[in-house]
Amino acid sequence: MIVNRRIFTIYSHILILCEQLEVIYLKNSGKVSLKSKVLTILEENRGKSVSGNRIAATLGITRSAVWKGVNQLRNDGYLISAVTNRGYCLTQENDLLNEPSIRTLLRTHDIGRQMDVFRTIDSTNNFAKRLAEIGSANGHTIIAEAQTEGKGRMGRSFHSPSAQGIYISVIVRPPVTLEQASNLTACAAVAVCEAIEDVAGVRCGIKWVNDVYINDKKVCGILTEASMNVEEATLDYAVIGIGINVNNPSFPDDISHKATSIRLEAGGCINRSVLCAELLNRLEERIDTIGDGAFMDLYRARSILDDRDVTIYNNGIGYRAHVLGIDERGRLIIRRSNGSVDRILNGSIEL
Ligand code: BTN
């Protein structure tokens, strides 16, 4: 039994690695796979039929090559209908995350301009950090349908089931001071709230420092990992990792009391590519204005902790406190049980 599980784990790792190598190879060689080219045309015409002849002529390939590309996409899970004399149609319900569908909705200058989308990955943050180390550009975005080792703050894991959530990491290299860089998570939290409200119409709040909540349950976690140039006291790069529970119908028993999804709160499924693109658009807007500090007012206005009694954990030690608010630098202002008032920069909060 244990041996079987081990073989399966090794096999899964090899598959993940192969997919990563394929994506990297195609990117570096400037080649775009046949199915990606076909998908781009179908995505540009989503909901409408496009004839095999037209696709073939546009791409300079044969009709049987188009058919092969369509079949590969179907094997990947895309919902493509075929009607005699009318052609192929990517249905509106199709919800697989893919580069063309996200790209057509982007309004950004850098974020998402370089993008890799994986079916499965260990952790988008880990992959993005490896890319950043070898010099990947500002805005390079990694997205996955599932993560096998999705990670959260304080060594926790992040539940990342396939085709339900959005698991995304963005490499950013903004020209900011280290103090401004420490606000990147806050920027991302505001961007997530704005994107969810825009696309799903449900009000979101922020649980300091990195969680987005709907109706007192967690819908999104953010993990920002950064590399600094210590000598010059500047930011080299940061990887902003965002995990959103979008269309999850339910959660495992151990987290079901504190986790929720947009679907559960809004009462219907959300198109994940649309949400993904809106998130990237908002994230860039917020990071572009990180220097003027205005976003901190937006962040504070969304805090769900104000005037609540909480338990704060720091280095494994917990203590009770009353939250008074968040200051202009993003620090949590608390009153301890002995009456003293403190401003804390990090910690994990339990409601
Ligand atoms: C937390 O809740 O403590 C933060 C969760 C962050 C999860 C995201 S999902 C995308 C990115 N890749 C990871 O491994 N983690 C982040």
Image (spheres, rainbow, N blue to C red):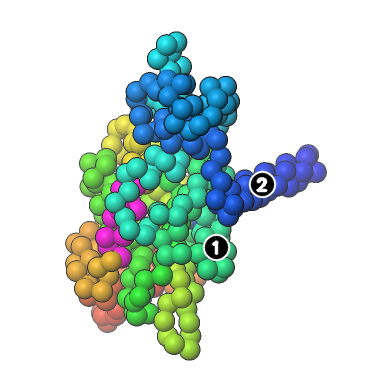
Q: Amino acid at mark 2?
A: Cys
Secondary element type, mark 1? helix
Horizontal arrangement in the rendering, residue 138 relative to residue 302 (left or right): right
Q: Residue at x 33, y 71 (%)?
A: 183
Q: Amino acid at mark 1?
A: Leu
Using the rendered view, name the quadrant where residue 210 is placed.
Answer: bottom left
Horizontal arrangement in the rendering, residue 301 relative to residue 336 (left or right): left
User: As rendered, which of 132 and 261 lies closer to the eye?
Assistant: 132
Does 129 appear above or below 167?
Answer: below
Secondary element type, mark 2? helix
- Which residue is under mark 1? 131
Sequence-wise first label, 2 or 1: 2
- Residue 208 showing in the rendered view: no
Q: Residue at x 38, y 43 (%)?
A: 102
Binning the other alpha carbons within 10 Å of mark 1 as few (below 14), some (14 to 19) or many (20 upward) gives some
Does 221 appear above or below 256?
Answer: below
Our reading of the magenta stretch's main secondary structure is: helix
Using the rendered view, name the quadrant where residue 233 is placed.
Answer: bottom left
Does 267 appear above or below 202?
Answer: above
Q: Give the extent of the magenta segment.
A: 277-287
Magenta stretch: includes residue 108:
no
Where residue 287 sits in the image (x, y, percent)? Answer: 30, 65
- Which residue is under mark 2? 18
